[in-house]
Image (tube, rainbow, N blue to C red):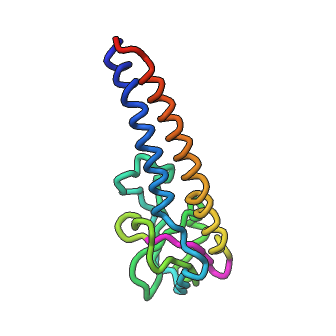
Amino acid sequence: MTAFRLLWKYLSPITQGALGLFLLLYWVTSPVPSRNELVEIDGRLASYTVEADRSTFAFMSKRHNYVLFNLENHDGRFWSEYLGANAATIFSQKGIPVRLYVSPHPRTHSINGDGVKTYGLYVDGSEIVSPENAIGVDSMIVRWVSPVLGTLILWLAWRSWKKVAREPAR
């Protein structure tokens, strides 16, 4: 048996188990805020930038660029996953009114150091995403996708390990 095959045989179930446990841990530790918890922020657009993701796990993310924007008279920057290639159209000029909703106790890390996730975004009176829709998407990922996928991966790891344990030593 080659070294690669031997490594794959024993390391695969361990890696699958770790990934499954990580997804279940994410499910347990990542509650989604309720609509009543969100804080409304109104302001005027000061500026926006499109930046590459500089987080530690950027290589694992489908999103490689974030649109981060500042509001006049508000500290920090904000981001929304619903802004993308059309950011230049949405943020067509400085000073347009922006209303957004954020969690008072963010449960996710800041993007590129200070970017706070928004759960609802209205620009110049037009709805980009409602707080209810943004919460619904996050809720589905955290409450359904993560535990189901984590449990499935753990089951596959268990089956792989049973198969390894049944094989006679060589």
Q: Main secondary structure of the magenta part?
A: strand
Residue 96 on image: x %, y %: 57, 82
The quadrant of the image that shows the N terminus is: top left
Q: Residue at x 54, y 45 (%)?
A: 151
Q: Is residue 119 magenta?
A: yes
Q: Relative to 7, is 79 on the left or the right?
A: right
Residue 110 on image: x %, y %: 40, 67
Residue 87 on image: x %, y %: 56, 66
Q: Residue furthest left?
A: 3
Q: Is residue 43 magenta?
A: no
Q: Which residues are magenta?
A: 116-126
Q: Residue at x 61, y 68 (%)?
A: 134
Give the quarter of the image for residue 126.
bottom right
Q: How many marks?
A: 0
Q: Relative to 33, is 76 on the left or the right?
A: left
Residue 138 on image: x %, y %: 58, 63
Seen from the viewer's position, the closer of residues 7 and 97 is 7
Give the quarter of the image for residue 32.
bottom right
Q: Residue at x 52, y 86 (%)?
A: 43
Q: Residue at x 48, y 34 (%)?
A: 158
- Indicate whether 89 appears above or below 103: above
Seen from the viewer's position, the closer of residues 105 and 43 is 105
The quadrant of the image that shows the C terminus is: top left
